[in-house]
Image (cartoon, grey):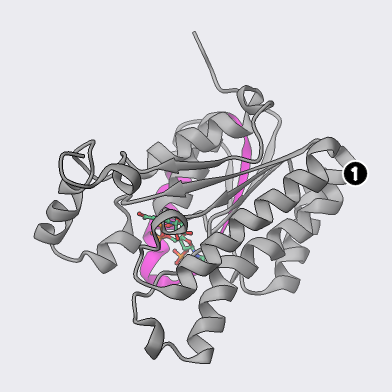
Amino acid sequence: MLTIDLKGKVALVLGGSRGIGGAITKTLCEAGALTIFTHKGNPKYRDRVETLLNQVSNGGGIAKAKILDARDAAKTTSLVNQIVKEKGKIDILLCNVGQNVARAAEELTDAQWEDGIEITLSTAFYGVRAVLPHMLKAQYGRIILIGSSAVYDGGGGAIDYAAAKSGLTGMMKYLVKNYARKGILTNVIHPCVIDTDLLRERYFDEEKRRQLAGQVPVGRLGKPEEIAGLVAYLVSSWGDFICGQSILVDGGRTLFSGPGG
Ligand SMILES: NC(=O)c1ccc[n+]([C@@H]2O[C@H](COP(=O)([O-])OP(=O)(O)OC[C@H]3O[C@@H](n4cnc5c(N)ncnc54)[C@H](OP(=O)(O)O)[C@@H]3O)[C@@H](O)[C@H]2O)c1
């Protein structure tokens, strides 16, 4: 039987309480990794955090939730240092935080632009910068950045989002060029039309989501678990020869959604 074995690994998922990040947390735990995940502590989603923690512990895994606004660079570094102090290392970093508010580029204010870039791009940098010294010391690390199909087609409805997600691809290339020889492998996964709160905020009624699913050659929206499975594969020993890749997980929508697609 093929297995993905992450026993003994320590993972940090920035933005890992629900949606794609929640599925990643759950899957890494199922594969045996001790997984610390962050969230903003929004009372609206308190139940989701509890449910996730229960699901993980019922499955025999270990997850720990930390309230942290990923925009706080200093606190991100403190959390990373605290994890390393307590657990000895961080093997796996997931940068999953992103914000997509659809609005016309000509109406975007400076503050909205800066906010979008900070949430979607800078938070990943804060996480990467904090883990690198520890991963370098260990000569081992696996970093996954969560991008978007917007990098390929400009979709998503926001110029700051498309620009910030494209920035993650540049970040990934820099990391591979400079750190792959030191045991730190980085890849970007680009989701598209994954059925999460983020998607449902934009496509808020059933009919809109049905139309969206109709654009996908596979014929449906994606599930968060379908991103999480790929993450688990890439950060396991199965992924030890894979780095510098941008991988679309989109049911074929981005490249093949035209007539007959
Ligand atoms: N869904 C899609 O189809 C799709 C497509 C392309 C790309 N993506 C990308 O995939 C990633 C996850 O998307 P999703 O659809 O799963 O989003 P989601 O349902 O909105 O979940 C977002 C997660 O990130 C956390 N988070 C948000 N802002 C944060 C912050 N400032 N600090 C710490 N945690 C924060 C949230 O925590 P709280 O519960 O505390 O808010 C939650 O756990 C994003 O980067 C998104 O851009 C998604």
In the rendered image, which quarter is residue 117 located in?
bottom right
Name above or below for residue 63 compared with residue 2: below
Furthest residue to the right? 137
Direction from residue 93 to residue 248 in the image, left or right: left
| Secondary element type, mark 1 | helix
Direction from residue 2 to residue 85 in the image, left or right: right
CB of residue at label 1: within 8 Å of ligand 1?
no
In the rendered image, which quarter is residue 47 located in?
bottom left
Q: Is residue 114 magenta?
A: no
* Residue numbers of the magenta segment: 32-54
Amino acid found under the numbered disc labelled 1: Lys
Name above or below for residue 123 compared with residue 49: below
Seen from the viewer's position, the closer of residues 69 and 228 is 228
Direction from residue 80 to residue 201 in the image, left or right: left
In x, y percent, where is residue 132?
81, 52
Which of the image's four quarters has the C terminus?
A: top left
Task: Report the residue at 39% width, 53% height from top.
Answer: 19
Query: Where is mark 1, residue-wise?
Result: 137
Task: Report the residue at 65% width, 57% height from top.
Answer: 170
Seen from the viewer's position, the closer of residues 113 and 123 is 113
Task: Report the residue at 69% width, 34% height from top.
Answer: 9
